Amino acid sequence: MRRLRITDLQEFSGRSHFLDGLIEGKRLRHGGLSFHPPGTVTHDQHRPHVETDQEVFCLLQGEGWIEINGVRSPACAGDIFIIEPGEDHHLISSHGNPFINLWLHADDIGHRNQQIDPEKAEYPNKPNNRPDIEAEVTLLTTEEGGLHKPFGQGARPGYDFHAGTINIGFIYILDREVAQPGETVKVHIWFLDPSFQAGRLYPGFEFTVNEAWIVIGRGVVTKVFNPYILKPE
């Protein structure tokens, strides 16, 4: 893991992105903005939490700690962390000033273009542990306010399970490589922080799929694999 401050970044005129030269990859591939509630530990139920490529954390607000391979160090707004493949990493928000984190990945392609065998589920950056849920998701059409392009493997959209927050998680399509707006697909989902859904979910639970706060699809849980989030009978 490497640590920088935002003030360490140099003028990036002419470079492909603001971290060019610091991380591998000429194009930012995907990322998101995560809001971490006070006192929470990210991915605490999914240890170790590792990536197969570099991940960057840009802390926009808050203070607390970053944990790398079991070692905690203080962290605060303005810190940039470049996390290497295979490093078990977690953020711990303070109770008084929780984190807002911009996380990013880059590559030399700019989008996922791998041919994927759904039966083998060999997806890039796929978590090693079992998914939290299986669900059936119907993407809204473009005319309904949905996407203008296909929805690919390994995206990290948000999910609204009516818990007062948007829960981010990996999504993988089981029966094809991409889904078009308007299509219905079966998916596996790994939550980045399943604690938001502790004891809440069950087959038949309805939710929405979001980009930021915009609804791009609607889903229904078909299976719950993670007993931590299964609603007691």
Image (spheres, rainbow, N blue to C red):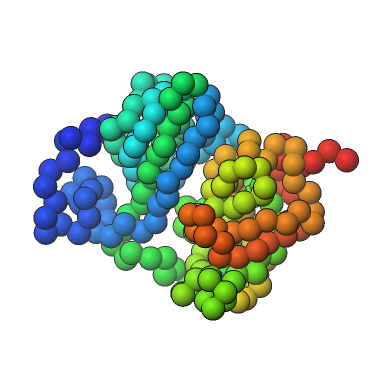
Q: Nearer the viewer, residue 176 or 119?
A: 176
Q: Nearer the viewer, residue 143 or 30?
A: 143
Residue 125 showing in the rendered view? yes
Identified at 40% across, 39% down, the residue is 101
Q: Nearer the viewer, residue 33 or 103?
A: 33
Q: Is residue 112 above or below residue 35?
A: below
Q: Give the left or right position of residue 195, taking residue 125 as reference.
A: right
Q: Quarter holding the C terminus?
A: top right
Q: Position of residue 149 (x, y in %)?
A: 46, 74
Q: Which of the 4 image quarters holds residue 26?
A: bottom left
Q: Give the left or right position of residue 20, taking residue 84 as reference.
A: left
Q: How many marks?
A: 0
Q: Position of residue 89 (x, y in %)?
A: 44, 34
Q: Nearer the viewer, residue 211 or 130?
A: 211
Q: Is residue 134 above or below residue 98?
A: below
List the single residue furthest toward the right. 233
Residue 119 showing in the rendered view? no
Identified at 34% across, 27% down, the residue is 76
Q: Which of the 4 image quarters holds residue 174?
A: bottom right
Q: Quarter holding the N terminus?
A: top left
Identified at 39% across, 56% down, the residue is 30
Q: Position of residue 120 (x, y in %)?
A: 60, 62
Q: Give the left or right position of residue 40, taking residue 188 as reference.
A: left
Q: Give the left or right position of residue 100, taking residue 24 as reference.
A: right
Identified at 37% across, 21% down, the residue is 73
Q: Position of residue 143 (x, y in %)?
A: 54, 78
